[in-house]
Image: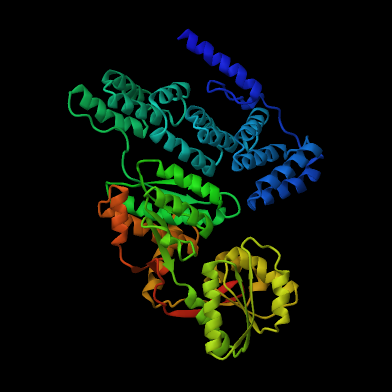
Amino acid sequence: MRRFYLLILLAFTVSCATLQPAVDKKPVKKDDAKTVQVNDQDAGAEDFIKKARSLYAEHKPREAIGATQEMLAKYPGSNYVPEAIYLSAKSRYDLNELDLALKNGWMLAEKYPQSKEYPMTKKLLGDCYFTSQDHLKAGQQYIEGLEAARTGDEREALLLPLSAMIEERLTDGQLRILFRKYPESEMAPALGLKLAQKELDAKNNSEAIKILQEIVKKYPASQEAGLAKPVLASLKDNKPVVPVGDVGRKVGLIVPLSGRYGEYGTAVKEGVNMAFTEYNKTTTNKIKLIIEDTKGDIIDAIKATIRLSDTSQVIGIIGEVLSGPTSAAAGIANLKNVPFLSPTASEERISTLGPYIFQLSQSISWQGAALADCAVNKLGMKTLGVMYPNDPGWAAVAEAFVQQAKNLGARVAVSVSYEPGTTDFKAQAETLKAGKVQAVFIPTTPNDIIMIAPQLVYNQLKVQLLGSDGWGDPKVTSKGGTYVEGAIFATLSSGSSLAQAAAKFEESYKKAYGKAPSKLSAQAYDGAKVMLAALQKGASTREDLQKALNQAENASQGASGQFAFGSQGAMPKSKLMTIRNKQVKELE
C-alpha cells in the first residue's frame, strides 16, 4: 500500500510540471487567490474579448483562439484574462487539441480559482479527461466543479455528465477512490450506492453491507439512504436482494444549451422537461431524461449521440434543434440502432435516414399561402417580395407564398434568401427596394426578425411587412419597436381544436416557467409526448421502442399544431394578426 501511495505522489509531482495533475491533486483554495482589482487595461481588452465571444459563437474556434491570444499579449493585466483563457481552452477542446485545452484549463483553474469561469473550467477539464477515457480524473474535475458551481445552469451542466459516469463508466475501484476522496460532496451518496451495487454483483455482500450502512449513517436525509435501507434489511434476513438504485429506462435529449443557439435549445429542453414531468407524475415506472449540450455544432451533436448510444439504459434520443446537427446525430443513432426523434428540424428528409429515425413534421406552408391571400385580396397589392433564410423548411413556406400569389394574379418581383447567421441584410434590402415591391413576406425566426426589420427601414425600404407566426413571439413585440409596427402574420383560428390544445399547453407552461412558451417549446413538448406514449406501451428495449414508434398514428394534433411522422399534416383554419402598439391584435 505504501508503494502505491509513493507512485501516486510521483505522478502528482510530474503532473504539476505539465499542468496536468494526477487524481490526488487538491484544488487550489479560493481564499489563497489574489483579489482581482479593476484596472485600466479592461477598456482595451473589451473589444478583443467581444470579438472572441462572437467568433466562438459562430463556430470559428481557430479564429477565437487568435483573438484571445492577441488580447492576452496586449492586456495581460486585464480582468478579462480568465474569460480569454477559458474561451481559448474551449476552442482547443472543440478542435480536439486536448493537451492544449488541458494546459489552458489548468492555468485558469490554478491562477484564477475565484473567477466566474472556474466552475465551468472544471467541467471543461472533466470533458477533456472523459474524451481521453480517463474517467477517474474526469470524475474528480466534475465533482470539484460541482462544489464551486454558483448557478443552477452550472450545477446541471456538471451533474449530467457526472451522473452518467457514475451509472455507466466508473469501475468499482474508481468509485471507491472518489467516494473516499470526496465524502462531503453531494454526489458521495450516489458514488457509495453504485459501489455497493457493484460489490453485490460481485457477491461481496459483507463489503456491500459496510458501504450501505455508511450511507445510511452519514447521509440519512439523502435519497440513496432511503434506497439502501431495504437492501440492508434483505441482506440481514437472507432474503433476495432488492435492486440497488434506479435502473429504469432513460431517454437522451441533445440540444444547444450554450453558444449562439442556446436560447433555442433551452426552449426545447423546457418543452421536453414539461412532458416528462407530466408523465412521471402519473406512473411508478418513471423515465429519466439525460440532457447533452451540443452547442448547435455538428461535431458536438455527433459526440453527444455516441455518448448516449453507448449508455445501455438510454433507449431513445430526442433532438436536436437545427437541421444540420440533427441530420448528423440521426445518422449515428440509426447506425447504433437507437430510436431517434426530431421534433423541430425543418429538413423534411431526416426521417429517410433509416428505420430508427422519426420526425415530427409540421406543415407551416399554409402560412405562406394565407399571407399571399391577405396581400392580394385584402390589401389589394400586386407587386410582392419574399425574403427568407436559406433553409429547406423556410424555403417551403416562401414557395407556398409565391405560388399562391401567382395563382391570385399577383407578381412576385423579388425573392431573396440569406444564410442562417447573417447579421447584415443591406444587400437583400437593396434588391427588394430595386424591385419596387409593395409588401415583403419574411418567414423566419424571432431573432432574425428583430435584426431584419430595422435594417429594412435604415435602407429606405418602407413597405408592408408580412410574416410567419414567429412574428407573434413576445421578443418581436418587445424588442422590434416601431420597426415591426403594422406587420401582419397568420396564426391558428381560436375556434379550432388545434388552438384549444395550444391554449392548454400555454397555460401549463406559464405555470411551470413563468413565461409564455415559444413555438419550439410546443414542438418539443409534442415530440416528447409521442415518444412517451410509445414507452407507455411497455417498450423496454430500443427495438421495442422502434416498433412502438412505427405503430404510432401517422397524423395527430398537439400544442404546436397539426403534425405527422415524416409527412405534411392537414392545413388548419387560420386567422390574420397584426402588431399594434407593441401588442398582437387580430387584423380587422
| In the image, residue 529 above or below residue 4 | below
Q: Is residue 378 visible?
A: no
| In the image, residue 186 above or below residue 471 | above
Residue at point 70%, 40% (across, down): 84
- The picture places residue 244, in percent across and down from the top left corner, at 29, 32
533 left or right of 463? left
Image quadrant holding the N terminus, namely: top left
- The picture places residue 556, in percent across and down from the top left corner, at 34, 68
- The picture places residue 77, in percent across and down from the top left corner, at 78, 35
397 left or right of 163? right
Comparing 151 with 532, the one in front is: 532
Give the total of numbered labels.
Answer: 0
Colouring style: rainbow
- Residue 38: name its quadrant: top right
- The picture places residue 129, in percent across and down from the top left corner, at 53, 32
| In the image, residue 439 above or below residue 539 | below
307 left or right of 76? left
Q: Is residue 275 visible?
A: yes
Residue at point 50%, 12% (across, down): 5
| In the image, residue 323 above or below residue 588 | above
Comparing 576 with 404, the one in front is: 404
84 left or right of 361? right
Comparing 6 with 207, the one in front is: 6
- Residue 452: name its quadrant: bottom right
